[in-house]
Amino acid sequence: MIHTKIAPFGSWKSPITSDLIVAGSIGLSQPLIDGSDFYWVEMRPTEGGRNVIVKRDANGTISDVNPVPLNARTRVHEYGGGDYAVADGTVYFTNFSDQRLYKQSGAEEPRAITPAAEMRYADMIIDGVRSRLICVREDHSVPGREAVNTLVSLNQGGNDNCGEVLVSGYDFLSSPRLSADGAQLAWLSWNHPNMPWDGTELWTASFGSDQTLENITRIAGGPHESIFQPEWSPDGTLYFVSDRSGWWNLYRVNRHGAVEPVCEMAAEFGVPQWGFGMSTYAFASADQIICSYLEKGISRLATLDTYTQKLERLDVPFTDIRYVRASPGTQSPQIVLRAASATEPAAIVRLDLETWEAKPLRRSSNLEIDEGYLSAPQAVEFPTARGASAHGFFYAPKNRDFESSPGEHPPLLVASHGGPTSAATTAM
């Protein structure tokens, strides 16, 4: 039996210390799928915070991709993200110290494919049809001038220039996405003073015979509409998340060229895009989307039928879900994401499309904590002085070794963040 002690709140002793939490912990982000191989990024405190791209092959063998001292991290928009891309076993990534793009094929030594210059690169995609990369480039080459953002193409083999400009004229750009046949490109743009969660524009274009863009068309967005994560479905339909209804919901461009809702509900299918490479949905096939959404700050995972528009919530043990990825077009699509809960640390997780069983590929920590010391968060909502509603999570005192005196009320400690680069989470 466990014998509890009567003691005032604030005096309870806990075996959970900051040293215990930090020891052996790593950061996990940016999972990608390349055939039967899975990749992700590990931020390792024991290596000075170095970002390491990690590969798990079809046999379950896990290995590091970028060797010491290379650090896979871009500084575009300062917060970075979208640090690497992979196709057919070849990885392209930005190195933190010099911000050059590197190419690494198999066991070969990585080599820089951009020159030493005051340029930064992020959000890379691989244009296999034209043997090139398309990415965001941030030009810091002119002292005293604000950095210039463009979308550029880069030869996969490397050359002596910093890329050929495809899109320019905007303060910020992100999310270049190629259609499955490589014929069309979509991207986002926005200008000062907007942040991407204030107002962005979604554009598409086709490629001319000289590989430059033509038929450039604004699809949606503006100074008061935030667009998030454009994606092409396997059948060539363009999907995106928009907050035009007041909620970040999923939309698409139909065969008549009109924008139509795919799933309208009082939930957030988008997140503040303070970094590159964020993903809340992915295509398992042309008729099935795997998506995560937020309800009162808690992540849900669901499938969405693109024809019936029926959303079916999946019973998974996660309450914090990010970086949803899938590999459509294969006989057995792969699904991977980063997930956590109040009792489980973040992990890169593979989902079985038939059983929806979750298999962790890599945990951020192997620390096991008795749930008798863990308080499960409760979503709370309360009015503000301006008549709006505020949301948060309430953690009641919990310690298997202690209890309070009858009638004693615990102190309330409140932690808040102005956001959006941080927010309350149910993750352990």
Image: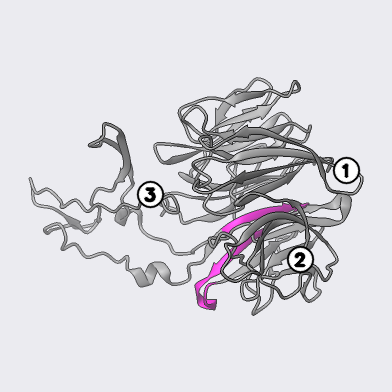
Q: Report the amino acid beneath label 3.
A: Ala
The disc label shown at residue 208, or none: 1
Residue in the image at 36% along x and 72% along y? 19
Residue 288 appears in the figure: yes
Q: Which residue is mark 3?
A: 424
Q: How many marks?
A: 3
Q: Position of residue 146 (x, y in %)?
A: 57, 62
Residue in the image at 59% along x and 58% along y? 81
Q: Secondary structure at mark 2?
A: loop
- Judge left or right: residue 378 versus residue 171: left
Q: Report the amino acid beneath label 1.
A: Gly
- Spatial distance from mark 3 to mark 1, Cα to Cα? 46 Å
Residue 62 appears in the figure: no
Q: Residue 42: within the magenta?
A: yes
Q: Which residue is mark 2?
A: 162
Labels 3, 1: front one: 1
Other-residue count near label 3 (Cα within 10 Å), few / some / many at <14 / 14–19 / ≥20 = some
- Spatial distance from mark 2 to mark 3, Cα to Cα? 40 Å
Q: Report the amino acid beneath label 2.
A: Cys
Q: Residue 50: within the magenta?
A: no
Q: Give the vertical position of 305 relative to 421 (above or below).
A: above
Q: Secondary structure at mark 1?
A: loop
Residues at marks 1 and 2 touching, judged by CB atoms closer than 8 Å: no
**Of marks 1 and 2, which one's residue comes earlier in the chain?**
2
Q: Residue furthest bottom?
A: 69
Q: Secondary structure at mark 3?
A: loop
**Magenta segment, which residues?**
29-49
- Judge left or right: residue 328 versus residue 243: right
Q: Position of residue 175 (x, y in %)?
A: 66, 48
Residue in the image at 53% along x and 60% along y? 79
**Of marks 3 and 1, which one's residue comes earlier in the chain?**
1
